[in-house]
Image (cartoon, rainbow, N blue to C red):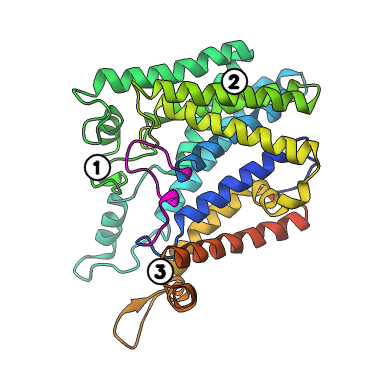
Amino acid sequence: MSTVLSKQRYVALDVLRGMTIAGMILVNNPGTWSQIYPPLRHAQWFGCTPTDLVFPFFLFVVGTAMAFSFSRFFDGTASLKSGYAKLYKRAFLIFLVGLLLNAFPFFPVRPDADLTFWENLGQYYSRLRILGVLQRIAMAYALGGTLALWLKKPKRIVVAFAATLLIHWGLLWIFGGGDPYARETNFARTIDLFLLGPQHLYKGYGLPFDPEGVLGMISGTGTVLMGYLAGVSIRKSVEKIHAVGLLYTWGLVSLGAGMVWSIWLPIGKPLWTGSYVLYAGGWTLLMLAFFIYLIDIKGREKWFLPFRALGLNPLFAFVLSGLFAKIFGSLIRWQMADGSTTTPLRWLYTNVFAATLGDNPAGSLAYAIFYVAIFTLMAMALYKKKIIIKL
């Protein structure tokens, strides 16, 4: 549905959210996966590249925005019961959209001629990935929101935040066997194999393992709660410069704590380890502090208008970018004169970006930036009409 755009107290939140969406689209849509600059790749298992910071940035800001939207459930403006209802409804819809995005186009485009329609359809859904980015957001948002509404007081939520990270660590350590953080034996993979089966998991790590798996929902909730606590601090700060000081301080503390903890628990996005939550959260706090100072205090909002537009319609931009990639990068295709098959997006990269800049990381990045620009322009059009599309 569409709603009229309302004035935001902290524009920096919209800008940071928009930057993360732009980052998600950028790293998911290179001109070619064989030509990517190292910082635009995920760490193979342990470690953290700039790309590995994009998703936790978004989850963090989900929690920060939640602190503002939930305030009406605590001041008597709206009932707590309605808060739970809206929380679960939105989480369900976000999960559903993620699942439908995975399932699109909902039927096999190039079916096996030896099988019936229903047999082809059965095979198509037998390999459907159940989880994904939006599903992780939905689950962490639902659990984090439940804890925030239930516990109410920030001190209790701090305890819940610590508990999510320690419980997640304990489960990995106790049930992970001799090498609890290995790709093959980690408990997160064991749970997903049991609940979903190997055919419904991500295969990008050389074996069935889902980086947005069920167990990571616990530590992912920690990221949301960390953002929520930051949002509470920001909302309660009388002076914005005071909020900036708090965010910088806790950002440095979180970064340091994450690096110290990594001595025993490696920093890693695939398992969404507690050390990764603190490390990524520290960077998010520092970035949020910087943008609040630059935008909300110094008034440099116009510099970041495209990102604000993306940040006000993040679901629209992310989902549409995924649909475009599937439609124009896979479904629509034709045969070239040399007998090879191409798609509109492949043709665009080969004949424009690779032809101009070369089939190299520079050409691949230029294509990705162009792809981001498409959805930024769409978001800008919505922004100018003061429209937000949300669930």
Q: Badge 3: few (under 14), some or many (20 or more) residues near its Cα, within 10 Å? A: some
Mark 1–mark 3 Cα distance, whole angstroms, equals: 25 Å
Q: Residue at x 47, y 33 (%)?
A: 139
The residue beneath circle 2 is 148
* Residue in front for this viewpoint, 308 or 86: 308
First in residue order: circle 1 vs circle 3: 1
- Helix or strand or loop: what does disc 2 sit on? helix
Q: Give the amino acid type for the residue marked by disc 1 in the picture.
A: Pro
Q: Position of residue 249 (x, y in %)?
A: 63, 22
- Helix or strand or loop: what does disc 1 sit on? helix
Q: Residue at x 39, y 64 (%)?
A: 32
The residue beneath circle 1 is 198
Q: Position of residue 100 (x, y in %)?
A: 45, 51
Task: Specify the segment rendered in magenta.
Answer: 35-50
* Residue in front for this viewpoint, 276 or 155: 276
Q: Position of residue 341 (x, y in %)?
A: 33, 77
Q: Residue at x 39, y 75 (%)?
A: 333
Q: Give the amino acid type for the residue marked by disc 3 in the picture.
A: Leu
Q: Give the amino acid type for the residue marked by disc 2 in the picture.
A: Ala
Query: Residue 34: within the magenta?
Result: no
